[in-house]
Amino acid sequence: MDMLEIMKKKEAYCSDHRDMPGELQKKAKMLCWRYNQTSPEEGDARAEILRELLGTCNPLTFIEPSFRCDYGFNIHTHGLTVINYNCVILDTSPVHIGENAFIAPGVCIACSGHSKDAAQRAAGIGTSAPVTIGRDVWIGANSTVCGGVSIGDGTIIGAGSVVTKDMPSGVIAAGNPCRVLRKVTEEDRCRITGEERG
């Protein structure tokens, strides 16, 4: 099995940095650079670049520059996806983003890591594990989602959180490390100004 096949699998893996597909990373860096130079009025150009960059790009994928990723082909959007400013996705493994996902400014999704052994780390041995973000998830500003994590449908991750383990569906979770605070309830519905009450 070649490195590209390993990278696209759902399983975690360890690798030598020399085995990683450098040419594909260069391509992603160039596409991100082009994307980040577009003006707010160039919606069609942005959409075209995202279709070339991402592995699966739902037409309702909206990413505000600046955006960076390692490879792009391992990022999959499955419905409305809103990614705000300064997001980084280190997609050395698959990253699946469910529909109606809202990812706030400064979020980092990091599949990749380094060996815990100092000698291996210095030699360029790395780790990687996939990330799955469910439907209707909101990830707050400046949060980090680590490799191997799944976030359940309808869950909210509070700003500044570090998500190191799976989060269930329908909860509000926050902190470092991120932990469940409570369930999302009917009480969390906003009362819109001017809306009829009854």
Image: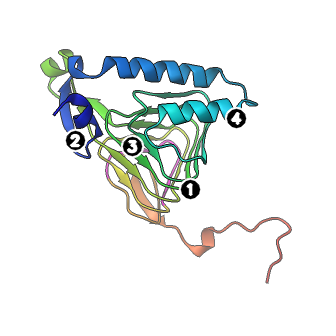
Q: Which residues are magenta?
A: 155-165
Q: In the image, residue 151 lies at what x, y percent? A: 40, 55
Numbered circle sitting on residue 43: 4
Residue corresponding to mark 2: 12
Q: In the image, residue 93 lies at what x, y percent? A: 31, 38
Q: CA distance from mark 2 to mark 1?
A: 26 Å
Q: CA distance from mark 2 to mark 3?
A: 12 Å
Residue nearest the viewer, comparing 181 with 86: 86
Q: Residue at x 19, y 15 (%)?
A: 122
Name which residue type carries label 2.
Ala
Residue corresponding to mark 3: 95
Q: Earlier in the sequence, mark 2 or mark 4?
A: 2
Q: Residue at x 59, y 25 (%)?
A: 35
Numbered circle sitting on residue 100: 1
Going by the picture, which residue comes out furthest to the bottom?
198
Q: Secondary structure at mark 1?
A: loop
Name which residue type carries label 1.
Asn
Q: Secondary structure at mark 3?
A: strand
> Is 71 inside the magenta-drawn segment?
no
Task: Count neighbours of disc 3 (C-alpha within 10 A) and say few if under 14, some if 14 to 19, many if 20 or more.
Answer: many
Asked if residue 106 shows in the view, the reply is: no
- Mark 2 near mark 1, Cβ–Cβ under 8 Å? no
Q: Earlier in the sequence, mark 4 or mark 3?
A: 4
Name which residue type carries label 3.
Val
Relative to 31, say whether 137 is above or below: below
- Mark 2 near mark 4, Cβ–Cβ under 8 Å? no
- Mark 4 near mark 3, Cβ–Cβ under 8 Å? no
Relative to 116, say whether 82 is above or below: below
Q: Earlier in the sequence, mark 1 or mark 3?
A: 3
